[in-house]
Image (cartoon, helix red, strand yellow):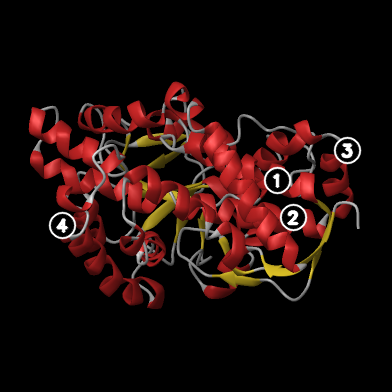
Amino acid sequence: MTHTTLPLPTSGIDLFADDVLHDPYPALRELREAGPAVRLTAYDAWVLPRYDHVRAALADHERFSSAQGVGYEDQFNTQMKGTVLASDPPDHTRLRALLSDKLAPKALAGLRTRIAALADDLVAEAVAKGDFDAVADLAAVFPVTVVADLIGLTEDARGPLLSFADAAFNTFGPFNARSEAAIPFVGQMFEYLNTVMVPENLRPDGWASAVYEASDRGDIEAASVVPLLTAYVVASMDTTINAIGNTILLFARHPQAYQEVRGEPALVGPAFEESLRLESPAQGFFRRTTQPVDIEGITIPADTKVLLSFASANRDERKWERPEEFLVRRNPVDHIGFGYGVHGCAGQGLARLEAQAVLGALVRRVSSIELAGEPVRKLNNVIRGLASLPVTVRAEGQ
């Protein structure tokens, strides 16, 4: 039998350049057309741009490992080793078990009423203004308030949390101006975790205290405490903030879709899932191959960094019909905006609870959402979101 070697798909696209981060979707479409696995000549890395292969890689931690970090730069990966993101089973299983206990559906059910009431109060306050910034006044306030309260942080200890999350995600990309600027904030984050987020400054019924108690019992090693706390400080807030902001922007740009949801409030959940698919807040993470991997006849060598592009997979024409449209009835429950497999976002249930509370309150209280100015895109190496979203709303009944 004759073995045919396929030509190696390569691309000079820089997925971390400013213009691409502003609008990554033409570049991602080009990568999907280039092949099922594409070598990036701008970096020492490959990318998987199609849905089936990204999902399969996410489910295959033995060949696509997270243990050496999920970012591009080794110097930053070293800092995150041992976290829930940067580990594989069995270590990952042991670390995640503690998070899963707090984020399980049964635990979240008890929070539903409280979160809904908080969201309604916050939305009512914003709507009363008529004009407001949907990021600064809503999306960036609500998750920080909810998560900081669940962690058990005092009011005066919450201020730096947003800058920590944004900086940490920037370090998952290549060494560029954004990751370089993030270095001081990441240093401050670890200092904060070691000196401020300590038992004497925490409510005893909060999630962070539970991590320390698990260490005291011997369920986890003392060295795992700070890596676990990073999951609460980083992963539990920034993605939710940006997912809410992205959805409100989509509502403002698609008034007919918003009216469709208003007419049928049960569509709030499916509309949020569609937003996660269309504007994935986490655009993708790296893995490292542990052995040569064949992708449709193309071999990715062992010990190679591979970017799993959630954003590209979630717009793959092979998976979705009319993938670039915002269709609130699509309900794409198998999108990978929150990842998949053992590394599927542990906090995705909480993120959905928070987002649906805020969006549901908007739908009840607001008859129309319009842009009051140009949205300002926040450029981050990994996270897609907004720095500002000025809107004008009309309250129900006006």
Q: CA distance from mark 4 to mark 1?
A: 37 Å
- Look at discs 2 and 1 and give the one toward the viewer: 1
Which of pointers 2 and 4 lies earlier in the amino acid sequence?
4
Q: Which label number is shown at residue 250?
A: 2
Tell me: residue 192, above or below residue 104: below
Instruction: Kindly state the secondary structure of the residue where label 4 is placed.
Output: helix
Q: Which mark is residue 194?
A: 4
Viewer-side label of 3, 1: 1
Residues tagged 2 and 1 counted as in contact (Cβ below 8 A) = no
Circle 3: is it few (<14), some (14-19), or many (20+) Cα within 10 Å?
A: few
Q: Earlier in the sequence, mark 3 or mark 4?
A: 4
Q: Are marks 2 and 4 in contact (CB under 8 Å)?
A: no
Residue type of the residue flagged with mark 4: Asn
Q: Residue sitting at 33 percent across and 71 percent down?
A: 182
Q: Residue at x 68, y 71 (%)?
A: 375
List x then y, in percent, for residue 57.
43, 34
- Taking the image as shown, residue 90 lies to the left or right of residue 41, namely left
Question: Which of 63 and 104 lies nearest the eye of the viewer?
Answer: 104
* Pointer 1 residue: 361
Q: Nearer the viewer, mark 2 or mark 4?
A: 4
How many angstroms separate mark 2 from mark 4 (CA)? 39 Å
Q: Amino acid at mark 3?
A: Gly
Residue type, mark 2 in image: Leu
Q: Rounded to the nearest whole Å, what is the CA distance between mark 3 and mark 1? A: 14 Å
**Mark before the other along the chain sequence, 4 or 1:** 4
Visible residue check, residue 180: yes
- Residue that carries the numbered disc 3 in the rendered image: 263
How far apart are labels 3 and 2 at the CA level?
17 Å
Q: Give residue 52's quadrant in the image.
A: top right
- Left or right of 331 on screen, residue 385: left
Q: What residue appears at the point 65 percent right and 58 percent down from the top-left corner? A: 25
Left or right: where 72 falls relative to 147: left
